Amino acid sequence: MPAVPRKPKPPSCDDCYFRKNLLCALELEEPCTTFRPNRPEGLVPPRQPVLLMRPPRWATPPAPGLAAIPLAGERT
């Protein structure tokens, strides 16, 4: 019979880095929003979403008359 994968147990305050290192002053029934797993490598920041750069939705056309003015050091 194949092994059935177990459902991971939900985190508890006892699994929190701050609680394990006596840095937590809260007495809650469930983990708070600052919960961080207590890992051997120490405090690990949460993963941040990847910032994707998008092209601009529109390009601003140059003002009339400015396109004919040469820039400094530019030859006409």
Image (cartoon, rainbow, N blue to C red):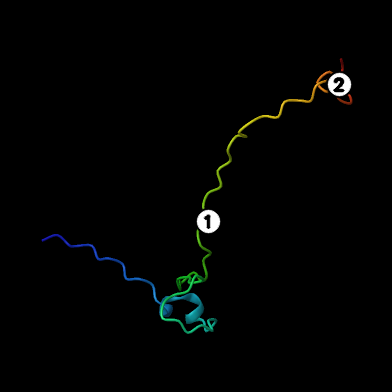
Q: Secondary structure at mark 1?
A: loop
Q: Choose between 46 and 38: the one closer to the eye.
A: 46
Which residue of the protein is positioned furthest toward the left in this rendering? 1
Is 7 drawn above or below residue 18 in the view shown?
Answer: above
Circle 1 residue: 48
Residue type (three-letter) at the residue carrying disc 1: Gln
Q: Residue at x 45, y 76 (%)?
A: 16
Residue type (three-letter) at the residue carrying disc 2: Pro
Place of residue 49 in the rendered image (x, y in percent of width and height, measured from the top left): 51, 52
Q: How many dots with numbers?
A: 2
Spatial distance from mark 2 to mark 1, Cα to Cα? 44 Å
Q: Quadrant of residue 61?
A: top right
Which residue of the protein is positioned furthest toward the right in this rendering? 72
Q: Residues within 10 Å of mark 1 (few under 14, many from 20)?
A: few
Circle 2 residue: 70
Residue 66's mark? none
Place of residue 4 in the rendered image (x, y in percent of width and height, measured from the top left): 19, 62
Q: Is residue 65 left or right of residue 16?
A: right
Q: Residue at x 47, y 74 (%)?
A: 32
Q: Residue at x 86, y 21 (%)?
A: 70
Q: Is residue 5 left or right of residue 2?
A: right
Q: Secondary structure at mark 2?
A: loop
The C terminus sits in image quarter: top right
The N terminus sits in image quarter: bottom left
Is 2 drawn above or below residue 14 in the view shown?
Answer: above
Place of residue 40 in the rendered image (x, y in percent of width and height, measured from the top left): 46, 72
Q: Choose between 27 and 9: the one closer to the eye.
A: 27
Which residue of the protein is positioned furthest toward the front in this rendering? 64
Q: Residues within 10 Å of mark 2 (few under 14, many from 20)?
A: few
Place of residue 50 in the rendered image (x, y in percent of width and height, measured from the top left): 53, 49
Q: Choose between 67 and 63: the one closer to the eye.
A: 63
